[in-house]
Amino acid sequence: MLINTVVQNEAERNEKMIRDYERLIAELPKGSLICRKNEYYYLKYREDGRMVDKYIGKDEAVIEELRSKLELRRHYAEMLAALKKERRAIKKVLEGLR
């Protein structure tokens, strides 16, 4: 059936995109930027179940680059969540076609 083929192709595309987004997210830094006394910045994130504060410094270029990477990671995470929701819908459609 044509519909079954189209839905199956969509499922394959969805799985590929999920893998791609997971790979992209893994390459980007996680956490959030924290500003402390005298405008010193730290990257705060969780590692092995504990909170870590990594010193970043005052360099505006480094801070802006890190800020943009964190924002990109958040965007990718939102897209990944949408793709996973779409995957659940595709599974329901495929189960209904069988």
Image (cartoon, rainbow, N blue to C red):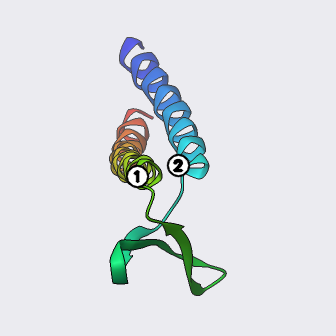
Numbered label attached to residue 43: none
Closer to the N terminus: mark 2 or mark 1? 2
What kind of element bears circle 1?
helix
Q: Quadrant of residue 59?
A: bottom left
Mark 2 surroundings within 10 Å by alpha-carbon count, few (fewer than 14), some (14 through 19), many (20 or more): many
| Residue at the top extreme of this rendering | 2
* Residue type, label 2: Ile
Mark 1 surroundings within 10 Å by alpha-carbon count, few (fewer than 14), some (14 through 19), many (20 or more): some
Q: Which residue is mark 1?
A: 77
Q: Which residue is mark 2?
A: 25
Q: Position of residue 72 (x, y in %)?
A: 39, 45
Q: Is residue 93 above or below residue 41?
A: above
**x 50%, y 62%: residue:** 30
| Disc 2 and disc 1 in contact, CB within 8 angstroms | yes
For this view, does 75 lie left or right of residue 57? left
Q: CA distance from mark 2 to mark 1?
A: 7 Å
Q: Position of residue 92 (x, y in %)?
A: 37, 45
**x 39%, y 11%: residue:** 2
Q: Observer-nearest residue: 67 or 20?
A: 67
For this view, does 75 lie left or right of residue 61? left
**x 45%, y 35%: residue:** 98
Q: Observer-nearest residue: 20 or 89?
A: 20
* Residue type, label 1: Ala
